[in-house]
Amino acid sequence: MIQVKNVTKKYGDFYAVRNINFEVKEGEIVGFLGRNGAGKSTTMNMITGFIEPTSGQIIVGGYDVDKKPKKVKAQIGYMPEGTPLYSDLTVKEFVTYMADLKMIPRKEKKAAVEKAIQSTGLDKVQNNLTKILSRGYKQRVSLAGAIVGDPKILILDEPTVGLDPKQVIEIRELIKSFRENHTVILSSHILSEISQICQKVVIIDKGEIVAVDTPENLEKTSAKDQMITVIVEETEKNQLPSIKDSISEIKEISFVEEKEDGSKEYKVIVENGKDIRKQISTTCAKSNMIILEMKKQEVSLEDAFVSLIEGRTEYSQEEIKKIQYQKEIQELREEQETKKAKKEEKKKEKQLKKAEKQKENNTEEQKQLENDQKTDETELDKIEKDVLEENQKENETEQPEKKQEQSAQEIDAKEISKEDSIAEEPEEKKSTIEENKKNKGGNE
């Protein structure tokens, strides 16, 4: 519902608040604690949009206070410290005026005013002038002005200051009832009041957030050692301190006083806040000591607040300026380191992208080479096939010629063979043949 992020408010060289961060969830009642001048009112005024932060961001109901101030103010009911009222207006007139400022529609305004007056118990004095009212009733009128119109967020600055005990109880119960429909931030110097009303506590000191936690957790954190008050009747002098040897958790036992009836009061300090009352009772019974009273000291929110605040050193204005200057230098260094880290990260991302792109390009080139190789192989296969086909055709064309040539060669070979056989016949046959030839020739 409310987010305060790294908010700083400076007045010249003075830091009213410095780099504060906290969050308030919807439906929570959050207490804002701090000493006078700690920065509570400054922070509340920045949340309402009354003053602007020097740096940082405040988000209220999803809207930036700096960019959408009207949207933010429409969600907030603010009760400032000091109950600033118009003394010449009656209670009803003042609440109606606040409704007009919040621009509540005319049809809804009358019912909204009556509801606010009834909720704050102002029915009987609604026609009285505000200047004649008691302090308690003036507080109620200021609260009625804040809650008129049922805003989602209520910011209450010291809502119970100056009230009598009965009025304080009534206002506390009223604030508790707001939890159902509102988110509440309230500041108070009455720590018991914060502890009873609030679900979460923000402690601010010297403009800086010291702690953000539940009241219960803050109380537990501050309770480093547990103290138990024991009143006993001893059978021997200073008998109770002797149980320290039997119970290891006991850090110290100190005598407080002797009572009128002769019993003695001791304070027992226990390490780490352990509850050892049962062990003390058993050990005392074994030593014949009678325990008249044993009480564990409860740690309050006041104790937690004091333990967190008192350890913080008080500085002069010059020392504060020096510390602030050192913090600014440190922040600048951290900012430079952050920028450098971001730059390095961007550089690495760029290199990574470049490497990935190169890898993709290499993959594409490899694929292209493989495709080209396949294409070349296909073309080679085609060429080889064409060559084979051509050779086959040539072979088919040359085959008849070869057959004819072979036939001619065979005929010649036969004739030569015949002549050779003739040459080898006997001389007589040869001469007979020649004579036959001559006779043929003479007859002719």
Image: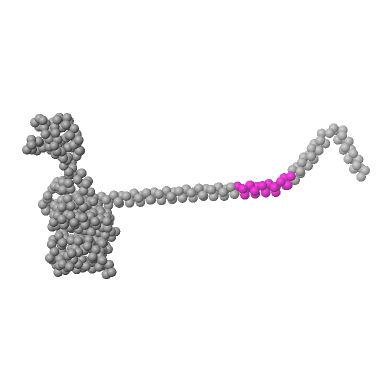
Q: How is the image coloured?
A: one colour
Name above or below for residue 158 compared with residue 233. Answer: below
- Residue 402 shown in magenta: yes
Tell me, yes or no, if residue 338 can be seen here.
yes
Camera-side residue of 197 and 201: 197
Name above or below for residue 234 compared with residue 17. Answer: above
Instruction: Give the overall secondary structure of the magenta segment.
Output: helix
Residue 356 pos. (x, y %)? 40, 49
Numbered range of the magenta stretch: 383-403
Left or right: 90, with 387 as reference point = left
So how many labels did they put on this image?
0
Left or right: 374, with 434 as reference point = left
Quarter placement of the N terminus: bottom left
Tell me, yes or no, if residue 209 can be seen here.
no
Camera-side residue of 196 and 65: 196
Quarter placement of the C terminus: top right
Q: Residue at x 23, y 51 (%)?
A: 199
Residue 33 pos. (x, y %)? 18, 52
- Among the 4 quarters of the image, the one containing residue 119: bottom left
Camera-side residue of 57 and 395: 57
- Among the 4 quarters of the image, the one containing residue 171: bottom left
Left or right: 208, with 424 as reference point = left
Q: Residue at x 52, y 48 (%)?
A: 373
Q: Residue at x 22, y 53 (%)?
A: 30
Residue 73 pos. (x, y %)? 24, 63
Camera-side residue of 265 and 26: 265
Q: Residue at x 27, y 58 (%)?
A: 181
